[in-house]
Image: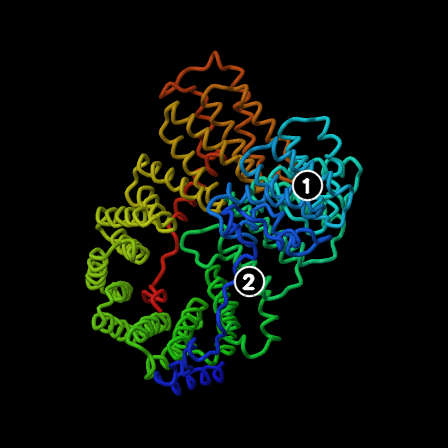
């Protein structure tokens, strides 16, 4: 490690700002030899004869269209987007003028017995008629073209276009007799011709007929072909939702048949992911990206496609950029970059640094350190600013991993480097103070915090100034200089309160919560409540979900232990529950549901008992999903207890029976819980004779609240444990304003 550190720092010292400028000359178009740009005009002019001033048919056009067989130049005649209007003809003002010209050409071809030219001109005239919704006229042209060909299949694209368009017209005109004669032929041509040219929107009905025939004949290959053509057809017409079921079926058929080409199979999953993204189904997008990665050949372009798919269409979590789901594909890229040439070294470094950020987000600090060190090794050609930023982030990772001595060595070298900017020096001094404080070197830590504060004041970085003030306040507070620490924290709040919350909300929330905890430990209870509520308002204004959750946790703890208030505690716990349902923490959600249920029970009214029952049922369903057997058993019995308190003893019996269906292995855990429940069942038989106690509830309810009754003990202990755990662990410092500014 020491050798690597010396190598990185030597590189930083040797680099000069002037030497890092890009010395390559910019490319200029004047330096390149560019040939003349020749504009290619369409070959046939829809002109007029100079003597008669009537449109004249070009012999070249008739000879061109009369070529036998299929040529690439004829494909524009059959395409659904009518490209021949621009690629073959010019000199006409309107489409009606071109249609008249094609009609004259048709007459000329008929007189000259140019059969292929006549068939193609009839096809063009029919397509122009369909474009104007003149279906009967189009039908006449297509029928004439088919009659002219006399069964000649030399130009398969022309024959397919004629059959598809004519069948489509019969379908739209509901001419079942003629449609029945052509439908199978048109379907066979569309399915059997490779790279067929789509010419009409009605082809989907013909292809669906082909799909039905394939399913009935149990032909997997024909079914896959029909699904592929239907998906392609709908995608050509930008109808992704209609293409989705056929593309899904196609992927299943490919896997069943064992499709040999993995790249095509992966391409289908990428396309499926894009369609799911358009329908706002981010988790299906992730599944498609993973499937595409598993069946692909593992090349760099495919990894980039997976990352792009997740970035564009995957789940978006506020404050998590880039998303954690790309880590899989970044790790797949590393072996490819290791074996590549030196031109990918910079990309290799970027991938390693991104993986380091993602690992640190999930508290895998050892892995994050390894990736960052690997990134520094691979990207030795980076600029001095970039290298120092990476070293600063590496230092913060060592702090989080509690390797403070290594942190001090790296940060000391950064502060002594002449290449460090003022902002980098401020960040380095701030983190150096954090490491020194953890090493119990309070004096040097205070000096480093003060240096960071001076640098932030010189550079007018208000956020960095607030962070340094807050860290100084925490240091003074832990050093028993509480009045001085409070003054620093108040100054930090004053600085941040003058800035827009949308920019510095996260730091503002942390500082307010820290100041509130300091007040709560002393005699200033009201000031602590103000700080917690202020932090909650800032988090709500900035839409910071994690900040709202932390502030509400502190408020719940405040109203449960510091300044007990059941109603306020209940309200904030319900808001905490609404936040948890936006976060993937079901365990904490179950704990909060139990807490809310206990708070409602403590109110002692029938309405409150019914609310407690509703939250208990929700926690029961959650514990069943989590397979938390002990908590599930307690929830069953808690629900039975509440039903008994509501004088619904038939339901008490039902819940007791449900609890007894659990495996016998849990009997010892819940044996003492079942005793009060059995007592409830016995007392239920005397319901009519029971007296009425305080609050209008059965007097026998007291049996459920005996001091040594296990359900009550568990509920009290669980509630107390939940309340104690609701305030998160107190952080000690802020890493300079931090690393986001680097």
Q: Position of residue 717 (x, y in %)?
A: 44, 41
Number of other residues with Cα within 10 Å of mark 2, as a class: few under 14, some 14 to 19, many 20 or more: some
Q: Tell us which disc is closer to us: 1 or 2.
A: 1
Q: Nearer the viewer, residue 448 or 78?
A: 78
Give the residue pinned by disc 1: 162
Q: Position of residue 348 (x, y in %)?
A: 53, 72
Give the residue pinned by disc 2: 304
Residue 405 visible in the snapshot = no
Q: Is residue 152 left or right of residue 505?
A: right
Label 2 sits on a secondary structure element that is helix
Disc number placed over residue 658 in the picture, else none:
none
Q: Is residue 647 left or right of residue 417?
A: right
User: How many numbered marks have been drawn onto this rendered protein structure?
Assistant: 2
Label 1 sits on a secondary structure element that is helix
Residue 384 visible in the snapshot = yes
Residue at 37% over, 40% down: 573
Q: Nearer the viewer, residue 401 or 384?
A: 384
Marks 1 & 2, CB-CB < 8 Å contact: no
Q: Name the image quarter holding residue 389.
A: bottom left
Residue at 52% over, 46% down: 54
Distance (Cα) linking label 1 and label 2: 43 Å
Residue at 55% over, 79% down: 342
Residue at 47% over, 28% down: 704
Q: Is residue 383 left or right of residue 685?
A: left
Colouring of the image: rainbow
Q: Is residue 446 above or below residue 228?
A: below
Q: Nearer the viewer, residue 649 or 109?
A: 109
């Amino acid at each position: 490690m020491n050798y690597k550190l010396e190598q990185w720092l030597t590189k930083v010292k040797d680099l000069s700002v002037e030497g890092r400028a890009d010395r390559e000359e910019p490319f200029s178009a004047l330096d390149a030899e560019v040939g003349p740009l020749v504009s290619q005009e369409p070959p046939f002019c829809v002109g007029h004869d100079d003597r008669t001033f009537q449109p004249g048919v070009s012999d070249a056009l008739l000879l061109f269209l009369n070529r036998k067989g299929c040529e690439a130049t004829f494909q524009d005649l059959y395409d659904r987007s009518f490209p021949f209007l621009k690629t073959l003809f010019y000199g006409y003002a309107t489409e009606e003028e071109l249609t008249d010209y094609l009609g004259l050409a048709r007459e000329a071809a008929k007189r000259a017995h140019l059969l292929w030219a006549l068939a193609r001109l009839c096809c063009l005239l029919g397509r122009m008629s369909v474009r104007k919704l003149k279906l009967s006229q189009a039908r006449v042209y297509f029928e004439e073209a088919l009659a002219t060909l006399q069964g000649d299949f030399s130009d398969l694209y022309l024959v397919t276009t004629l059959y598809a368009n004519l069948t489509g017209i019969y379908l739209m005109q509901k001419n079942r007799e003629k449609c029945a004669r052509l439908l199978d032929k048109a379907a066979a041509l569309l399915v059997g011709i490779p790279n067929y040219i789509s010419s009409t929107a009605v082809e989907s009905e013909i292809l669906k007929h082909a799909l039905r025939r394939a399913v009935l004949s149990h032909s997997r290959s024909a079914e896959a072909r029909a699904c592929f053509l239907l998906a392609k057809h709908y995608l050509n017409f930008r109808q992704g939702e209609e293409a989705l079921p056929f593309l899904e079926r196609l992927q299943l058929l490919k896997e069943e048949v064992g499709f040999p080409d993995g790249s095509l199979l992966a391409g289908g999953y990428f396309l499926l992911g894009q369609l799911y993204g358009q329908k706002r189904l981010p988790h299906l997008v992730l599944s498609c990206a993973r499937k595409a990665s598993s069946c692909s050949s593992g090349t760099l372009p495919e990894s980039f496609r997976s990352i792009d798919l997740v970035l564009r269409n995957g789940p978006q979590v506020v404050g998590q950029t880039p998303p954690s789901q790309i880590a899989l594909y970044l790790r797949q890229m590393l072996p490819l970059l290791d074996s590549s040439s030196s031109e990918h070294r910079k990309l290799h470094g970027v991938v390693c640094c991104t993986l380091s950020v993602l690992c640190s987000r999930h508290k895998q600090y050892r892995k994050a350190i390894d990736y960052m060190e690997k990134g520094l090794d691979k990207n030795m050609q980076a600029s001095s600013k970039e290298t120092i930023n990476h070293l600063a982030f590496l230092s913060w990772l060592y702090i989080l991993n509690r390797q403070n001595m290594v942190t001090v060595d790296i940060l000391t070298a950064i502060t002594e480097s002449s290449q460090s900017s003022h902002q980098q020096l401020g960040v380095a001094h701030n983190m150096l103070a954090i490491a020194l404080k953890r090493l119990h070197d309070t004096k040097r830590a205070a000096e480093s915090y003060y240096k960071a504060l001076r640098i932030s004041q010189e550079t007018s970085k208000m956020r960095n100034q607030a962070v340094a003030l807050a860290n100084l306040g925490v240091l003074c507070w832990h050093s028993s200089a509480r009045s001085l620490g409070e003054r620093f924290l108040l100054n930090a709040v004053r600085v941040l309160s003058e800035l827009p919350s949308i920019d510095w909300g996260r730091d503002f929330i942390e500082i307010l919560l820290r100041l509130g905890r300091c007040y709560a430990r002393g005699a200033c209870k009201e000031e602590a409540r103000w700080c917690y509520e202020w932090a909650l308002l800032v988090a709500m204004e900035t839409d910071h979900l994690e900040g709202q959750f932390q502030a509400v946790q502190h408020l719940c703890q405040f109203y449960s232990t510091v300044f007990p208030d059941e109603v306020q505690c209940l309200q904030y716990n319900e808001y905490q529950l609404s936040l948890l349902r936006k976060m993937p923490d079901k365990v904490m959600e179950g704990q909060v549901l139990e807490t809310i249920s206990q708070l409602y029970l403590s109110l002692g009214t029938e309405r409150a008992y019914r609310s407690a029952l509703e939250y208990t049922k929700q926690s029961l369903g959650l514990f069943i999903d989590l397979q938390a057997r002990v908590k599930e058993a307690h929830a069953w019995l808690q629900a039975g207890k509440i039903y008994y308190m509501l004088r619904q003893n038939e339901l008490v019996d039902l819940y007791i029976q449900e609890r007894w269906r659990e495996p016998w292995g849990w009997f010892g855990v819940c044996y003492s819980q079942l005793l009060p429940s059995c007592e409830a069942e016995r007392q239920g038989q005397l319901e009519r004779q029971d007296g009425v106690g305080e609050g209008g509830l059965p007097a026998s309810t007291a049996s459920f609240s005996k001091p040594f009754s296990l359900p009550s003990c568990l509920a009290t202990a669980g509630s107390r444990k939940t309340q104690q755990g609701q305030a998160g662990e107190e952080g000690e410092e802020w890493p300079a304003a931090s690393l986001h500014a680097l």
